[in-house]
Image: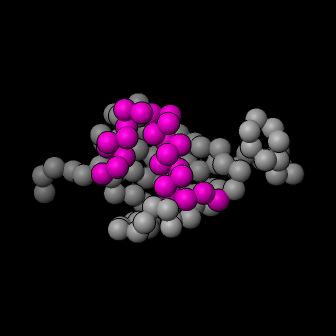
Amino acid sequence: MTGGLPETGSSETRVITVRYWAAARAATGNATETVPVPGPMTLAELTRVLVARHPAAERVLGVCSVLVGDQPVRSADPAGVLLEPGTTVEFLPPFAGG
């Protein structure tokens, strides 16, 4: 193991790209970040990693709509949403107005 991640036999880093919008961007201080991953992980696991990085974002991430790729997660259980390395996940807070 290197740096806490299992070796993959490849020098290529596997990541999940995360994009934040509006209040999520403000809470994390980032528009985009990458999360190194050893392999697939669930949306619930990714959210735990993000909250560990950005504790002030816990509340806002919990109420966000989430897109995986370009598909909305909707009401799916985050523990059942599998994310592959290379995936882009977007957190969109509720927007006021109409």
61 horizontally vs 50: left or right: left
- Of residues 72 and 63, the one nearer the viewer is 63
16 relative to 75, above or below? above
| Extreme residue toward the left, this view | 97
**Quarter of the view holding residue 39:** bottom right
Question: Which residue is at 60% across, 57% downward?
Answer: 41
**Quarter of the view holding residue 82:** bottom right
Q: Find residue 80 and report its horizontal and vertical position in percent.
A: 50, 67
Quarter of the figure with the C terminus = bottom left
Question: Which residue is at 50% across, 36% downward?
Answer: 52
Q: Is residue 60 magenta?
A: yes
40 relative to 55, above or below? below
Q: Find residue 92 and report its horizontal and vertical position in percent.
A: 34, 51
- Of residues 6 and 83, the one nearer the viewer is 6
| Extreme residue toward the right, this view | 9
Q: Is residue 55 visible?
A: yes
Q: Find residue 57 and report its horizontal and vertical position in percent.
A: 37, 37
**Quarter of the view holding residue 20:** top left
Report the magenta residues as a range: 40-63
Q: Main secondary structure of the magenta part?
A: helix
**What sort of colour scheme is used for the picture?**
one colour
20 horizontally vs 17: left or right: left
Question: Which residue is at 87% across, 51% downward?
Answer: 9
Mark count = 0
Quarter of the figure with the N terminus = top right
Q: Is residue 21 visible?
A: no
96 horizontally vs 21: left or right: left
Question: Which residue is at 39% across, 58% downward?
Answer: 66
Q: Find residue 22 and report its horizontal and vertical position in percent.
A: 30, 42
